[in-house]
Each structure stands twice: as C-alpha cells, then as structure tokens.
Amino acid sequence: QVQLVESGGGLVQAGGSLRLSCAASGSLSRISSMVWERQAPGKQRELVARIILHGIGGGNTNYADSLKGRFTISRDNAKNTVYLQMNSLKPEDTAVYYCYAITGGTYYWGQGTQVTISS
C-alpha cells in the first residue's frame, strides 16, 4: 500500500507561481514512477508530468508538450516527496491537480489539490 498526500494548491494571479507537493508513505520501494495529472472543470483529466523514480531511467522526466518550460517535476528522496513547480501560471491552468504512484500494475492516488489562477 502507498498513501499520497498533495498540498500546495491555492489561488494566485496569472503570471504567478505555485509549488505542489506530493508526500508518499507506505511501500515506497515499490513505486516506479510518480505522475501529476490535472482536471479542469468540464474537461477530461490530462497528464501534466511524470518522473521515473527507480530502475533504468531513474530521474527521467516527461511533460505534456503544452506545459514544457513552465512546469518542472522533481523529487526529494529524503522527504519521500515529489514536487511540481509551476511558473508563469495562466487562468487555463486552473484545475484540481492529482498525483499518483505507479507500483507494477497498481496505481495509488492522492486526494487532489485545487489550483485556481485569476486573470
């Protein structure tokens, strides 16, 4: 079992920044990748960023094409936490942001954190 807790969401003005955190606990050694997704009102959930934690490619990241250059995913192994740094935020970035952990064939989700960008 893996438990995830997201934090760091809030209300910011366009052009501002936020850093989201996803703290993991439980069977951490089983986690191969961590992913951030988001879901805006009335829209489907979409990939934001992914980071490989273990094995071949450990540390590698990938992003939604539309977010490259503004968003950065990173990890702090000592804190068992993955971060999403979001810069130059736009109103269209408003969404609930979720992190999830991939362990073999099982996904573990956090509860989500609301990000609202005002124009």
Image (cartoon, grey):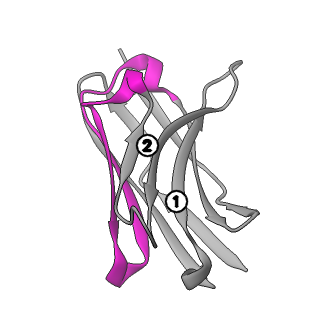
Residue 99 as seen in the image, left or right of residue 21: right
Residue range (magenta): 65-94
The spot of residue 110 in percent (x, y) is 64, 60
Question: Eyeballing the image, is 114 above or below 92?
Answer: below
- Give the residue pinned by disc 2: 10
The spot of residue 100 in percent (x, y) is 61, 57
- Of the 4 image quadrants, the one containing the N terminus is bottom right
Question: Eyeballing the image, is 48 above or below 28?
Answer: above
Packing grade of label 1 (10 A; few <14, some 14-19, many >=20) is: many
69 within the magenta span: yes
Count of numbered tags: 2
In this rendering, which labeled residue sits more in front, label 1 or label 2? 1
Q: Callout 2, which amino acid? A: Gly
Which circle's residue, 1 or 2, is located before the other in the chain? 2
Q: Secondary structure at mark 2?
A: strand
The spot of residue 35 in percent (x, y) is 53, 52
The spot of residue 84 in percent (x, y) is 37, 50
- The picture quadrant where one finds residue 18 is top left
Kindly report the distance in space between the C-alpha atoms of the residues bearing marks 1 and 2.
Answer: 22 Å
What residue is drawn where x is 34% and y is 66%?
75
Q: Residue furthest top?
A: 119
Residue 89 as seen in the image, left or right of residue 31: left
Q: Secondary structure at mark 1?
A: strand
Q: Are marks 1 and 2 in contact (CB under 8 Å)?
A: no
- Give the residue pinned by disc 1: 34
